[in-house]
Image (spheres, rainbow, N blue to C red):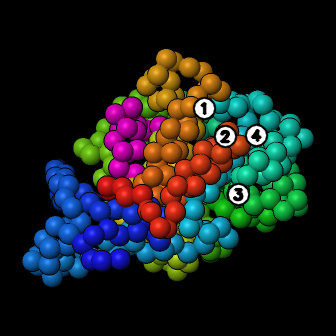
Amino acid sequence: MRTGAARQIAGGTVAFSACMVVLANHARVVRSAAPLADVEAWLAGEAPALRAAGASRLELIGRPRADFAGLGMDRPRVIGVVNVTPDSFSDGGDRLELRAAVDAGLEMAAAGADMIDVGGESTRPGAAPVSPDLECARVLPVVEALADRGVRVSVDTRRAAVMTAVLRAGASVINDVSALGCDPEALPVVAGTRCPVVLMHMQGRPATMQRRPRYVDAPYEVFRFLDARARELAALGHPEGAVAVDPGIGFGKRDRHNAAILARIGSLHATGCPVVLGASRKSFIARASKGEPPKTRLAGSIAAVTASALQGVQLFRVHDVAETCQALSVLGSFLRPAGRQQADL
């Protein structure tokens, strides 16, 4: 592709012809949007350190991603949510029994889910933690049953003991809402096993995260945190392609923070990692609409998925698998290499 015209995002079918330059210090974040050609010309005239840093970020945005947990990142992938909990915000109690949870996972896989994410502890705002033993009792039978049937499984957990147990039971991916920051043993477990991991941003803890979340610039702060965390894992020898990043919509964020992050979610491609979005059925959808309860937020969930897919996001964690797969299939039918959609980052 001609220099200065456009660049692919992560080797996929979406490209960008303009970008946002972000300059920051401890107190201030300055943004400036410009055509890609202008940014490249500006970098060429800057000091070597800044020129190298800018070129590195542009290269990371465009670099094709390695497979994540055996999934090619050349097209969007869907992760179905199965919560084995009594109190999750959307489906708490629906799948607390083993048969119900396993059947739900199998149905999602049949409907097109590339992975099933199993959770045994609610992390909704205000949720109280549960013990690792209870969490294991909830998720291990589900993980084993799904893995035995050839389903790719991730587990949503913050605890090293649970991570170790579910990996032994057949889970392929660890999905940690605390980005391996809740349990001091979590980072060594993931680094030691070299397992694929989703690092999510959360300000605070589930019990208190929505009380007074504050940011100078939410998209930049989320990017900076996730980038640093991914680099920390890489420094420990974690394989390229085995880390994905999730901005944590609704986790220690007000609606204005969520909106800003979603509008600029493409900036997370500059981490060099696949990007995960988990916006399905979340309460910001109801507040932007008519106050609908969780199970009637499908349209808003699809809107968030579609807008993010147009920014090159690769992984979508959802409750409504068949509907999301249909939406992404339609979107993909006109996002072809011969006529790539352009997006501003």
Q: Which mark, by number, is residue 257? A: none
Q: Which mark, by number, is residue 84? A: 4
Q: Quadrant of residue 92?
A: top right
* Image-based side of 201 in relation to 224, left or right: right
Q: Which mark's residue is nearer the viewer, 3 or 2?
A: 2
Lower position in the chain sequence, tag 3 or tag 1: 3
Q: Quadrant of residue 191?
A: bottom right
Task: Mark 1 and mark 4 in contact? Answer it, CB < 8 Å.
Answer: no
- Which percent across, then down, holds residue 115? 71, 56
- Marks 3 and 2, how far apart at CA: 14 Å
* Residue at the (29%, 42%) spot, across then down: 215
Lower position in the chain sequence, tag 3 or tag 2: 3
- Which percent across, then down, holds residue 334? 52, 55
The residues colored magenta run 250-265
Q: Which one is nearer the viewer's eye here, 59 or 53?
A: 59
Crowding around mark 3 (Cα neighbors within 10 Å: few <14, some 14 to 19, many 20+) is many
Mark 4 residue element: loop
Crowding around mark 4 (Cα neighbors within 10 Å: few <14, some 14 to 19, many 20+) is many
* Residue at the (46%, 49%) spot, across then down: 308
Magenta-drawn stretch, dominant element (helix, strand or loop): helix
Which residue is label 2 attached to?
323
Identity of the amino acid at label 4? Answer: Val
- Which percent across, then down, holds residue 162? 71, 55
Lower position in the chain sequence, tag 4 or tag 2: 4
Q: Which mark, by number, is residue 114? A: 3
- Marks 3 and 4, how far apart at CA: 19 Å
